[in-house]
Amino acid sequence: MAKRPNIVFITTHDTGRHLGCYGIQTVHTPNLDALAAGGTLLENFFCTSPVCSPSRGAMMTGLYPQHNGLMGLAHPPSSWTFRPDVLHLSQILQGRGYHTALFYHQHEVMPWDIDRLGFDEWFARQEGEHRPADTVAAAFADFAAAYASQEPFFAQVGFGETHRRWDVGGVVPDASKGVTVPPYLVDNDAARQDAAQLQGAVRKVDDAVGIILRALDENGLAENTIVVFTVDHGLEFPRAKWHLYDPGIEVAFLIRWPGGNVQGGRRCTHLLSNVDVTPTLLELIGETPPTPLDGIPFASLLRDPAGPATRDAVFAMYLQGGTNPEARCVRTDRYKLIRNFGNVRIWKTPVDISTPAREPDNCPVTQLYDLESDPLEFENLSGRPDVADPERDLNDRLWRWLEEADDPILEGPIRVPIYQASHAAYRQWKRDT
């Protein structure tokens, strides 16, 4: 039997697709660009939530947030958690004989609950202070040297530099190749200064990715190691993170496995979701999920990007916490429908980050965008007769998804876990008395 591959799973915060291999020519990402050139890049890959924990939770379990329980941020005051029977990818792989290791950061549970995720070891521990990306990568390099003869292993590596503030860990602004201001923002001095700081953070992460890739090469591990680089959600700008517009849910996904024919500078244009990641990795290594998952494996597209599509729509949810803004969306290749269950922030566009302003009108119940003619999602077409058919189709898709995902929003406003626990205690008290 062929030796099972190692898996190195690298994540960053809030980076969207702000990388050279995704066409951002002013950012310095030679190592990530090389990873893309040696593997497969997903051009239309989206997350399930524009918020850290629920997006990561869906990616690492193969279950939508409504099913795995991690519907909002894991840290207080929200304190959302996985349901007790939900398995993280590290737990699944640990049960299949993989040595599992975490390097610095994850955002699926709080640090004091790390045992919940099934890691055998934890390096560059998250203990309050920031760990610079090069420090985290150096810890992985030491691990790779020690475990080169003890395969297979699963290493989850998290970098924090691209989460605002963007100046931690020795990051300095980088405008050496110019700056790229996202098109949904006003291009002014404030935006350019912000973009330069972001580019410096991305460069710091790219340098660290280079350390990891060199460690795999130097220890003879590159050929039989699946390397994944991905992001939790979009950039930390108004109308991106915290929103269901494309800039909030579009993310990078690069994967390379030379020994498994995932190589060669391939680009896949099919629509894909990060809830598909766990079943895809399991399929690549010849394993089946221990329980049914929501995600659809796309391993076939990694070897033949022009093959048949595995899905024709992606879905995402937004829950800020408590009874604060909530929304759900469905996206096809052509259209996006956002259904609002609360008064989400509607920005005047394009957004001037020096003086951001909101629209004076109330939030619309539904927002419909033609992504072909309006890729920035500035013109809401909902209610127009000429798009009645696609709007009806997307509404049908969204309602079906909400039912299939057992979304509690269909029963009323969603409360944070601490409210649910106290209300359960009240109901128990009523039964007892």
Image (cartoon, rainbow, N blue to C red):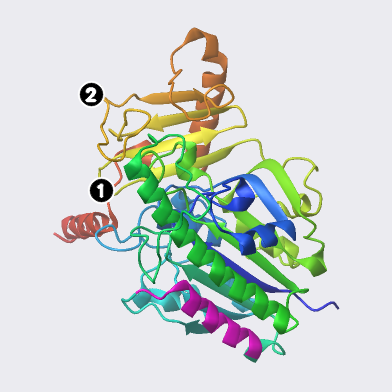
Secondary structure, mark 2, is: loop
- Give the x, y percent position of residue 132: 43, 74
Q: Is residue 190 placed above or below 370 in the rendered structure?
A: below
Horizontal side of 296 relative to 383 (left or right) equals right
The residue that disc 1 covers is 322
Q: Is residue 246 magenta?
A: no
The amino acid type of the residue labelled 1 equals: Gly
Q: Is residue 138 magenta?
A: yes
Secondary structure, mark 1, is: loop
Query: Which numbered dot is residue 76?
Result: none
* Residue under the image location 78 percent in, 40 percent down: 308
Q: Earlier in the sequence, mark 2 or mark 1?
A: 1
Horizontal side of 395 relative to 4 (left or right) equals left
Quote the CA–CA distance across marks 2 and 1: 24 Å
- Give the x, y percent position of residue 111: 37, 75
Q: Residue furthest left?
A: 433
The residue that disc 2 covers is 360
- Give the x, y percent position of residue 104: 45, 76
* Residue under the image location 26 percent in, 42 percent down: 324
Q: Main secondary structure of the magenta part?
A: helix
Quarter of the picture containing the N terminus is bottom right
Quarter of the picture containing the C terminus is bottom left
Which residues are drawn in magenta? 130-145
Q: Nearer the viewer, residue 216 or 67?
A: 216
Residue neighbourhood size for the residue with mark 2, other residues' Cα within 10 Å, grouped as few (<14), some (14–19), many (≥20) = few
